[in-house]
C-alpha cells in the first residue's frame, strides 16, 4: 500500500485525482437529461435513483440509452485524464468517479447503483475486463432474463479475472467496487431470492 502512495504521482496528486474523479462521477446525467426533456424529476418514479434503468421507466428508451452511455463515459474519462499523470492516479480517479456517481454531493449523496460507471472505469483501466463483463452480462441476462443478476454475476467475475490475469492493483479496486455494487443492490438481491424481481421485457 505504501508503494502505491509513494509511486509516480505521490499522495497530493492522488488526492487531487480522487477529488477530480468524484466531481466527474457526481454529474447526475439521468436527472439532467430527464429534466431537459421535460419529464420532470426521475427520482420521483420507480426506484427513485438516477440511473439508466430508472430513466427507462419514463418510457423514453433513447434517453435511457444516453444516460447509460454518459454514466459509463464519465468513469472512462476520469480514468483516462488522470492516467496522464500516472497509472496510480488513474485507479484513484476511477474509484472517485464510482463514488461520485453513487454518492453525489449535489443530490444529498443519493445517486445511482453504479453499474454503468463501474463498467466505464473498467473500460478506461483495462478494456479487456470490460469485454469480460459484457460477455458475462449477456450470457446471464439471456439465460435468466434478470438484468440485476447479470450485473451482479459479472461484477463477481471481473475482479477474479483481473487477479488471474495479473493486474493486481486494478483487481483490488474492482474487488472493492463489487462489494459496493452488491450493497447498493440489496433490494434487488432480496427480490431475486423471493422470486419477485422483474425480468427483462416483462410487462407491468
Image (cartoon, grey):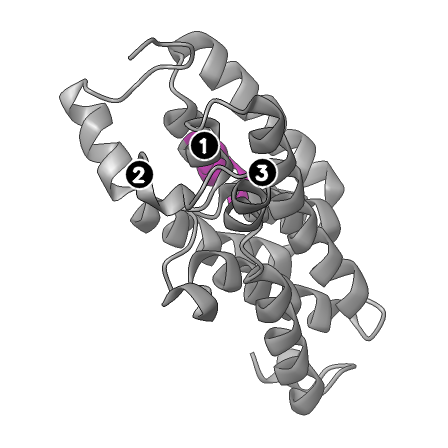
Q: Is residue 144 left or right of residue 38?
A: left
Q: Is residue 190 left or right of residue 96?
A: left
Label 1 residue SS = helix
What residue is at 26 percent from the left and 22 percent from the top?
197
Highlighted magenta segment, given as a residue range: 153-159
In the image, which disc is placed on residue 47? 2
In the image, which disc is placed on residue 37? 3
Task: Tell me how far mark 2 sits from mark 1, CA to CA.
Answer: 9 Å
Residue 45 location in percent, x, y? Answer: 32, 37
Seen from the viewer's position, the closer of residues 13 and 56 is 56
Among the two numbered marks 2 and 3 on one chain, the one whose residue lies closer to the N terminus: 3
Residue 79 location in percent, x, y? Answer: 72, 60
What residue is at 71 percent from the left and 73 percent from the top?
89
Residue 118 location in percent, x, y? Answer: 56, 47
Q: Which residue is mark 1?
A: 53
**Would you identify the image quadrant in which residue 67 lies?**
top right
What residue is at 73 percent from the left and 51 percent from the top?
124
Among the two numbered marks 1 and 3 on one chain, the one whose residue lies closer to the N terminus: 3
Mark 2 and mark 1 residues within 8 Å of each other at the beta carbon:
yes
Amino acid at each position: 500500500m505504501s508503494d502505491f502512495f509513494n509511486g509516480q504521482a505521490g499522495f497530493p496528486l492522488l488526492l487531487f485525482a480522487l477529488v477530480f474523479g468524484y466531481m466527474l462521477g457526481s454529474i447526475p446525467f439521468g436527472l439532467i437529461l430527464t429534466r431537459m426533456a421535460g419529464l420532470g424529476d426521475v427520482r420521483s418514479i420507480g426506484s427513485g435513483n438516477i440511473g439508466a434503468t430508472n430513466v427507462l421507466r419514463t418510457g423514453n428508451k433513447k434517453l435511457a440509452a444516453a444516460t447509460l452511455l454518459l454514466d459509463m463515459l464519465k468513469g472512462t474519462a476520469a480514468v483516462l485524464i488522470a492516467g496522464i499523470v500516472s497509472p496510480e492516479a488513474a485507479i484513484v480517479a476511477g474509484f472517485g468517479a464510482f463514488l461520485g456517481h453513487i454518492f453525489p454531493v449535489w443530490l444529498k449523496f443519493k445517486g445511482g447503483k453504479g453499474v454503468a460507471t463501474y463498467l466505464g472505469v473498467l473500460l478506461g483501466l483495462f478494456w479487456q475486463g470490460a469485454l469480460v463483463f459484457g460477455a458475462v452480462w449477456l450470457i446471464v441476462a439471456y439465460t435468466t432474463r434478470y438484468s440485476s443478476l447479470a450485473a451482479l454475476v459479472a461484477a463477481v467475475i471481473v475482479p477474479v479475472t483481473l487477479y488471474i490475469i495479473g493486474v493486481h492493483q486494478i483487481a483490488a479496486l474492482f474487488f472493492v467496487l463489487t462489494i459496493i455494487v452488491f450493497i447498493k443492490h440489496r433490494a434487488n438481491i432480496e427480490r431475486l431470492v423471493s422470486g419477485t424481481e422483474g425480468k427483462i421485457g416483462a410487462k407491468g
